[in-house]
Amino acid sequence: MERGQNVVYLPENSCKKCISTFIYVYKIMSYSKQTNGYQVGGSLGESASTYVVRQADSQLYEGLKTGKFCYLLNCRQMGKSSLRVQTMARLKKEGVACVAFEMRELCVHEVTEDEFYGGLVSYLVSEFNLDIDLENWWYGYSLIHPAQRLTKFIEEILLEEITQSIVIFADEIDSVLNLSFKDDFFAFIRGCYNK
């Protein structure tokens, strides 16, 4: 159904109460998005008028500008992703190369280390628009551990191709906790910070 559309086709034997509840909720959500900008769930866009600037905005921004390792800890639906969107927009305006990804997209059921690290590298290549034959590069270093390949990629490709400061945001990092190789990934992050 498109926004503003009032026609709903009911399948046979449908629960009319459920459908009418859906229509009511849909109309409220549709109306609120059109008139006052409120949003239910998800991160707010960088120009959202409903975004509330908090102390964390300046703390995260200043920390990243000075090269610090930063993290946000809070419950779900508390504005972490919206804060990331706002901070990313500010950094990009100042010429910082930024990318953000959802860790849960990489942490699918029974993902292998090669798939996880290869997926992360593939995402970075795509988002930073790097000109590289990734498949040949990735499998050309198949004798070294995938975490070491990620490090090699960042040091020899990413940092050579992207001349400005780089900030990589990882959302839903708790998804990594279910992986058998989580310690290697967190060691990689620590290694990036220590260099």
Image: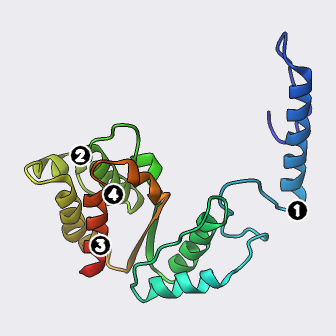
Residue at 52% of width from left, 79% of height from top?
91
Q: Residues within 10 Å of mark 4 (few under 14, many from 20)?
A: some
**Amino acid at circle 3:** Arg
| Residue at image mark 4 | 125
Q: Quadrant of the C terminus?
A: bottom left
Contact between marks 1 and 3 (CB within 8 A): the answer is: no
| Residue at image mark 2 | 114
Q: Tell which circle, 1 or 3, labels the residue nearer the N-terminal end.
A: 1
| Residue at image mark 3 | 190
Contact between marks 4 and 2 (CB within 8 A): the answer is: no
Q: Residues within 10 Å of mark 2 (few under 14, many from 20)?
A: some
| Residue at image mark 1 | 36
- The residues bearing labels 3 and 4 have C-alpha atoms spaced at a distance of 22 Å
Quadrant of the rendered structure where residue 167 is? bottom left
- Position of residue 82 in the picture relative to residue 150 (left or right): right
- The residues bearing labels 2 and 1 have C-alpha atoms spaced at a distance of 46 Å
Q: Tell which circle, 4 or 1, labels the residue nearer the N-terminal end.
A: 1
Q: Tell which circle, 2 or 1, labels the residue nearer the N-terminal end.
A: 1
Q: Tell which circle, 3 or 2, labels the residue nearer the N-terminal end.
A: 2
Disc 4 vs disc 1: which is toward the camera?
1
